[in-house]
Image: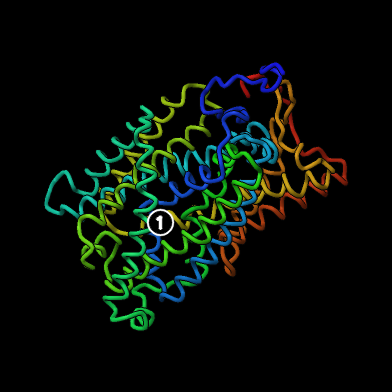
Amino acid sequence: MNKKKEWPWKDTFGDYSMVPVPAHERRSFLSIFYVYMGVLACIAVLWGGGTLGLQFTLKEVVIVAIVGSAILAVIGGLTAAIGGFSKCSTYINMRGPFGRIGSQLFGTIIAGVACGIGWFAVQAWLFGIIMHTLLPNIWWANVGVAAIWGGLLMMTTAIIGFRGLAWLSYLAVPFFMLLAGVGAMIGIANAGGFAGLAQIKPKNPVPFGVGVTEVVGMYIAGGVITADISRYSKRVLDGPIAWIVQVIIFQVYMLSGAAALTLATGAANVAQALLVGGAGLGAILMAILGQWTTNDNNLYNGALSFNTWIPIKKKYITLGEGLIGTALAAWFGFYAGASMQVFQNFLTFLGKILPAIGGALVADFYLYRWYKKEPLRQRYQFKPGMKIAQVNWVGWVSVVLATIIGGWVMKSGIAALNVMVLGAVFYIVIAFVCDKCGVKIEIGEHTLDETGV
């Protein structure tokens, strides 16, 4: 068969950011799993666990981690399957519930702002905290200063695409598994045994729902954009299974290990806790390994989203993201220093604003298109010459309502779960009512060309 007929697209912008991944580029289950693990293996997860250790007892930490991770498993597994079916990035899939313009807007909010700029800034700031913890009396290890040069280095490696850095992912994952285990053992030893550790009361207790929302906020951006990785899978279920395993098993393990460490040492952050616990310089250097692999992914995902409305080479987008993110990291460093309040507020904010987008996406793909009797494997099968809506107003309205009501108006329950469920419910109810009343949910029309634009 003629190759052009098999794959009638032109990958103009690189990395199949605007078009489906062709068959010859698809990867095995283990490859997909390891990429997800490479994203999870970062200091922010240990910092998140350390934060939980300041807020809950060890038993409560485990429960909070399991519940939060279960929410992430559901939304991430469902969106990963969408990528497995469509072979397209999250931002292309979002054309379904939000239309072409909506996919640009909400995709940019998730990956461009939350990942490409927000998480990049937070990771660079945490890098600055680690350097300051190691070298508190050196000027270039000041939190703000180290955040600047660390962020610029991370941005540079992402721009030049230095493929030799891929080996860091293979080192970072086992190192982080080891580091979480080391943290747990230090916690048990410092507390005089597991029973003693279980009896320690947290310094700054918070409600259960707040903790779950922090866990969800920690990884919700990744949970909504799982299709960016799963689109490379050979089989539809490879992505969902890989995502669920790493988030349910390994995230809970890492959060619990870091929490045990801060509970037992009473340190304000994981870096200090490692030093207090006697883990030494080597353990902290292992933590630094994860910064490059994860922040490279943050810039990559952000560039994919910006590419949907800024049709230029990804390296130029990466440069812009990196500079803005580094400036923000420096501001965190000079303004907040090593205070964890910025980190807690960031996680809570993400846990309230992003789940609704995933809820609407899941509702459109699995429920609304099932209601419209569209075969599962024909959903989101974009082709050159295909006409798509400019705007699906139901998706926009659903996300805004769910975010405001679930994130800020409702005072009971878990904010992240409230927002996600409301996003799906509002979408399917409004779309169903409009269909029954003959009201169009789509506005305008756009024809795709062979570059996916």
Number of numbered labels in the structure image: 1
User: Which residue is at a point 74% across and 25% down the rendered structure image?
Assistant: 386
User: Where residue 264 appears, x then y in whole percent?
Assistant: 30, 74
Outermost residue to the left: 137
Read off the residue under disc 1: 45
Placement of 353 over or under 232, stated as above or below? below
- Give the camera-side residue of 98 and 298: 298
Mark 1, Cα crowd under 10 Å, few <14 / some 14-19 / many 20+, is many
Q: Seen in the image, is 353 located left or right of residue 236?
A: left
- Side (left or right) of 253 relative to 281: right
Horizontal and vertical percent position of residue 30: 52, 46
Q: Is residue 118 above or below residue 313?
A: below
Q: Can residue 90 be seen?
A: no
- Residue 326, picture quadrant: top left
The residue at 39%/44% (across/down) is: 169
Instruction: Where is residue 341? Give x, y as percent.
Output: 35, 60
Seen in the picture, residue 290 relative to 387 is either above or below; the reply is: below
Judge from the rendering whether residue 197 lies leftward or rightward of residue 20; answer left or right: left
Q: Is residue 45 left or right of residue 20?
A: left
In which quadrant is the C terminus drawn? top right
Q: Nearer the viewer, residue 381 or 143?
A: 381
Quarter residue 58 falls in: bottom left
Q: Quadrant of the N terminus?
A: top right
Q: Name the residue type under label 1.
A: Val
Name the residue nearer the viewer: 88 or 344: 88
Residue 402, how many percent across, how many down? 64, 54
Depth order, front residue of 400/357? 357
Q: Is residue 47 above or below residue 361?
A: below
- For the point 23% across and 63% down, which residue is it? 279
Colouring chosen for the image of the structure: rainbow
